[in-house]
Structure formats: structure tokens, C-alpha cells
Image (spheres, helix red, strand yellow):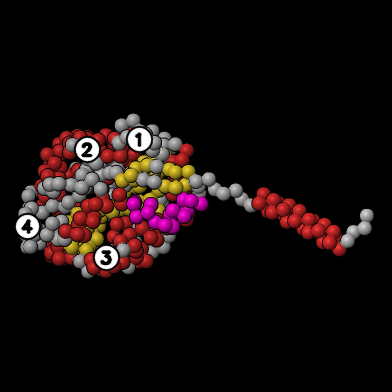
Amino acid sequence: MKLTKSKIFGLVSLVVVVIVILGTIVWRQSQPKPVEIQEVNGYLGGEKIGLFDDDEFAKLAEQSGLKVNYRKAGSLAMMDADRAGMDYLFPSSRAAVEYGKAKGVDTSNADIVFNSPIVIYTHKTVADALVGSGIMSKDSAGAYHLDMAKAVDAMTNNKTWADVGYQNGYGQFRIDSTDPVKSNSGNEYAALVATVLNGGQPATTDSVARDSAKIKAIFAKSGWMETSSEDSFNQFLTLGVGSKPMMIGYESQLLDLAVNQPDAFKQVKDDVVIVYPTPTVWSTHTLIALDDKGSQLLKLLKSEAVQKLAWERHGFRAANFAGTDSIKRFNVPGTLEQVTAVTELPNNAAMQAIIKALS
């Protein structure tokens, strides 16, 4: 059979088409399969919402095959919440984990992810007035420190703001917090008060029983308390010195504001002061994985990329109590590189007693 030019051209074209098809098949087979995305759901402490809403965190989660969803809840409140369909709980302390364990939560797969010291937020006029009276001090680096023994003594003796040096304050001296029965920052503040009342030694069930009236009286000064640290901090920024002269919070909250809301931080940076209580306690943000998807999230959170992101953009110190670089990166006045004046939290029995006393 004689091959004409048209037949030769057609044959060559067919061969080319076959080669292209085979090449495409081989190329597709050589490509990595798309990552299957799984949705992971759970309860999250409000102070960590900024991280979970971060686009970079969403990208890192997607690379790990996860789409992370959350419901905001106080660290203690989430332990009593409906866990149907939930893959994780992410409270802000080991104390909350122990509380959950006592409530029947499976905490066998739990690990500390971030750390943040409990601090006090106030206003410069208040801070400087309290420095003048001696209840607070300011070190050579510009960091403020509150003597917790003097502060607790002032509150138990119903001292007014004027008594502690702040002449413009209305009513009795107090330090506002979130609800200690539902939220971790308030709960850890209660533990700190109970420890101070116990002579600086971690509170015990006996000391809590002895001091419960004083502890309740201190919290009664605050009236209504938020259940979320995020809501409480926002209220502090919004309402100003007349409504909330001082409040308990996490160090990470002001650092997060400085990075992610620079315009808002610019408005408050000359007014809002971060104060380190002497002593303070560490808030150990601990993820409880309830199933395999929760375990995958825990692995993601412990990864170097997320630990770096959590520090640099949201102010959470890594699980080894240090950031990836100096805290000076945030340009927030009065922060400490290392927090040294720290006390241990009371044991679980004492923490349960504090919660019962304040319920």
C-alpha cells in the first residue's frame, strides 16, 4: 500500500495525539493527590480567636488537611457544654483540664500548646498614682509591677481608690476579672488571691474554707463579670478608666492588638498600661483532643510554623515559656522578656473548692 503525504501526516498526527494522551496520564499519575480537607470542630477560649481567624493559620491548617471551626466558650464553661460533634476543647489552663476531667471529660490526649502570663491592664494615670502610694512599682526598664499582697490586703480591708493613691477613682479599690466560675483568667485570678491569702503558698482546701468569705467579698466588688477574656478586654478598651480602672487579662492580648489592629493600638498605647502582678501565674493553653481529628489539630498547633505564627502575630509564648525572638518586636512599652515572679497554681482539689465557693 502506497502511503500518500496525507496518510503519512494523519499517521504522524495520530502518534502525536497518542503520545500527548499517554504523557498526560503519566503526568497526572505522578502528581500528588489533592489533600482531603476535614472539618474539625470544638470549643475555643476567646483570647485565641485572633489566631484561629488568621488567614495564615487557615493556610497552614489546609496544608494539613484541616478546616478548623470553633465556638467561643469560657475555659470552665466548655467543660460543661454539649460535646456532641466536637473534636477538641481548647481552654486556657491545665486547671481547666483537671476541672473537665473531674466532670467526666476524656483528657487522656491533652497537651500544653502555648503559654501566657496572667497580667493586669490599667491606665497610665491609675498606674502612676498607685506607684506613688507604694502598692505598685515601676522598674528601670519601664515595666510596672503590682504587689499582690498589698493589693489583696487593700481589697479585704475595703480601701477606696483614694486610699491607694488614685484620687479620681470612684468607690472601693478593685481589680475586675472574668467570671471565675466560667472563665480561666478569672479563675486563675481567684487562685492567685487565695494563694496570697495563704501567705504566698498555693492555696489548699483548708485555706480556701478559711478564706472563702474574703475571696467572695473581693469578687463581689466587681458586680457583673464577662465569661470571655476577649469580651472583657474589649470592654476595658472601650469603656475607659471610669468604668474599668483595672482588669485581669493575658499578656498576649495587648501584643495581639499591637500587631493586628495597629490603628486601635495607636489610640490606646499612651494610656493602656500592662502590669505584672508579683507574683503572677502562668496560663497554660492546653488542647484536649477528643478524637483523631482533634489529634491532628494538636499536631498542627505544636508545629514550628504555628508556634512561630502564634508568637509573632498573636503574642503567645511557646510551650517552653519562650518566644522565637525578643518581646521587643511588638514595640509595646513595659513588657518583660522573662517573667520571674511566678507562683504555682493550687492543686485540683483546692481549685475545685475555689470554684464551689464562688459559684
Decide which of 354, 228 is in the foreground and name it.
228
Identify which residue, 69 or 297, lies in the foreground. 69
Question: Could you tell me how far apart the alpha carbons at marks 4 and 2 are, in whole angstroms?
Answer: 29 Å
Q: Secondary structure at mark 3?
A: helix
Callout 3, which amino acid?
Ala
Q: Quadrant of the N terminus?
A: bottom right
Q: Is residue 11 above or below residue 267?
A: above
Which of the two discs, 1 and 3, labels the residue nearer the N terminus?
1
Q: What SS does tag 1 mark? A: loop
The amino acid type, in three-letter code, at marker 4 is: Tyr
Q: Magenta residues?
A: 48-63
Ranked by sequence position, the earlier of labels 2 and 1 is 1
For label 4, the residue is: 170
Task: Give residue 319's position: percent from left, percent from top.
Answer: 40, 50
Cβ atoms at labels 2 and 1 below 8 Å apart? no
Q: Which residue is mark 2?
A: 355
Q: Main secondary structure of the magenta part?
A: helix
Q: Position of residue 72 (x, y in %)?
A: 31, 46
Q: Measure how far apart labels 1 and 3 are at the Cα level.
A: 36 Å
Three-letter amino acid code at the position of disc 1: Arg
Quadrant housing residue 165: bottom left
Q: Which residue is pictured at 44% across the width and 53% down the height?
A: 58
- As drawn, the label of residue 264 is 3
Based on the picture, tell me whether residue 343 belongs to the magenta stretch: no
Name the residue that disc number 1 marks: 83
Query: Where residue 130 sits: x, y (%)?
Result: 14, 61
